[in-house]
Each structure stands twice: as C-alpha cells, then as structure tokens.
Image: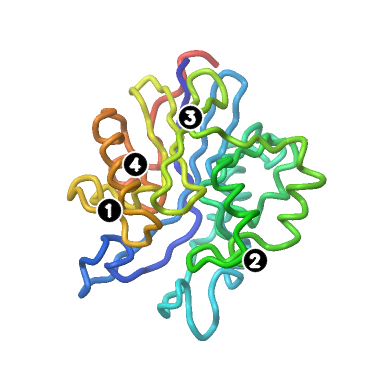
C-alpha cells in the first residue's frame, strides 16, 4: 500500500526554548507551526488532527497568552482547516479518518465538523482523560471543551475508534502509542512511495531527534527517549507536528508524490 502525504499549515505561535528542548535553550524562543497531516489513497482520506479553532482567541488567555507565556497564536489568511481542505478539493464531510494526537484543544476543537470520519484516539489516553480528576498537564475542560466530550460519547460514539498501543487504521496506515508529550500522544506510520513516513507530536521539531534531546513539555522523559529511539531506528521520514522546518524540507507541504494506486 502506498499513500500520499501533505502537510497543511494551520497556525503559528512562539514558545520559550525549555518547552522545546527539556531544560535547555533558556535564552531562546522558538517558533512553532501547527500542522494537520492529510493522508490520501486506497479510499482513505485521513487527517491527523482537526486544527485550531476558526477564532484563535479560544486558544489563549488575553492576560497570560498561549501556554501562559505571553505569546499568541496566529495564522495567515486561508490557513483555517476548512480553507486548507478546500485547496485540495475537499470538504470536512470527505474525511474518512480523523486521528487525534494528542487530545488537546488545538487538535479537537473542530471535531464536530467531520461528520463522516472515524475518530481515532489512543485508548490509553482516552482512559486517562476519563479517570483523572486533577492533573498538572491535562486539565480536563481545557483539553477538550465539555460539549465536544459529550459529542464524542453520544452522537459520534459509533464512529470513535479507541486505538490499542499498536494498531492499524487501514492497510499501510498504522499507529503506535508514544506517550512522552501527553498520555494520548501517538505516532501515525504511513507507507508511501518515498518510504515510511512517521507523523507525531512526541517530538516537536526535528532537532529533538538530531540533538537526541527530549521535548520540554514532557509527561515522561523515559517514554520520550524510547519514542525517539524507535523513530531514529525506523529510518522513517519523521514529521514533527510543530516544526516549521517541515515546509523547507517538503516545499508546499508535499511530503510524498501521488500514491501509486488512485
């Protein structure tokens, strides 16, 4: 099986260095480019994440900013996920699979728009979300707005797929649990005509792998180390979901050519 992979830029922010590299880069700020991965082929039109809200002020506090560090989230005209899909001749109703990693506001806020998609979520992360009352990293109602939680367990529930720690969405389209960033963080492995492509939030930028340095917003250093080792040893084209460098390495967000089979 061979799929096409495109990256859709959906927002920007800036964060302090220690959020990108654990306990490092204290004197630097790094720019993040939030991305949605579009995967197509063999009857599958999949998205990794649903992208931030149309009104980006949902994602930051006017006083505290995004991540409480004073920065804001912004986007260029035409970068809202619905507009980005339209550039590829698609509408939300055309999406067959929506993979959420991690469970957090900027990945889940648009989930109701995807009325026909199977919604894939880490079972490990889903259980953690529903059994944890207080957590310093995963505050329940800021991860997912209450009406979206209700939507997933009622109207959308028949379309929810809870992923095992090693699982498959379709032939040639697999997932594995990474942890590291959040309890719900996973990697999506895609077979393409350019080789294996791995899409994940377990590394924020390619520099995490190149420097062998775990992410700073990290729920488990041990999990980060294991995930980074697996990614390096796989030989995959790794697409960190916040790395603006993805668009330099893959101009126009085109990661692979058209799949061999329409």
Query: N-terminal of the two: label 4 or label 2?
Result: 2
Quadrant position of the C terminus in the picture: top right
Mark nearer the viewer, 1 or 4: 1
Disc 1/disc 4 C-alpha distance (Å): 26 Å
| Label pair 1/3, CB-CB below 8 angstroms | no
Between 66 and 9, the one nearer to me in the picture: 66
Disc 4/disc 2 C-alpha distance (Å): 37 Å
Label number found at residue 141 = 2
Label number found at residue 251 = 4
Label number found at residue 214 = 1
Q: Eyeballing the image, is 87 above or below 198?
A: below
Disc 2/disc 3 C-alpha distance (Å): 28 Å
| Label pair 4/2, CB-CB below 8 angstroms | no
Q: Position of residue 94 (x, y in %)?
A: 68, 34
Between 3 and 102, the one nearer to me in the picture: 102
| Label pair 2/3, CB-CB below 8 angstroms | no
């Amino acid at each position: 099986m061979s799929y096409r992979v495109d990256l859709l830029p959906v927002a920007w922010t800036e964060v302090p260095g220690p959020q990108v590299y654990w306990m490092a880069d204290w004197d630097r700020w790094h720019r993040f480019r939030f991305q949605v991965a579009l995967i197509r082929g063999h009857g599958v039109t999949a998205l990794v994440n649903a992208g931030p809200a149309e009104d980006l002020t949902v994602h930051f506090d006017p006083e505290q900013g995004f991540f409480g560090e004073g920065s804001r989230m912004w986007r260029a005209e035409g970068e809202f996920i619905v507009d980005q899909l339209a550039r590829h001749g698609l509408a939300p109703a055309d999406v067959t699979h929506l993979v959420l990693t991690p469970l957090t506001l900027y990945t889940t806020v648009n989930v109701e728009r995807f009325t026909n998609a199977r919604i894939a979520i880490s079972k490990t992360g889903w259980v953690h979300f529903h059994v944890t009352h207080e957590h310093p990293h995963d505050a329940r109602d800021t991860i997912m707005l209450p009406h979206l939680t209700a939507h997933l367990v009622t109207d959308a529930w028949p379309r929810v797929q809870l992923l095992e720690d090693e699982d498959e969405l379709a032939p040639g389209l697999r997932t594995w649990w990474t942890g590291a960033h959040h309890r719900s963080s996973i990697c999506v492995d895609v077979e393409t005509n350019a080789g294996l492509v791995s899409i994940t939030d377990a590394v924020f930028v390619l520099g995490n792998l190149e420097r062998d340095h775990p992410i700073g917003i990290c729920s488990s250093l041990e999990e980060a180390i294991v995930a980074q080792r697996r990614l390096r040893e796989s030989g995959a084209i790794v697409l960190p979901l916040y790395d603006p460098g993805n668009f330099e390495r893959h101009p126009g967000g085109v990661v692979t050519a058209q799949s061999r089979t329409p």
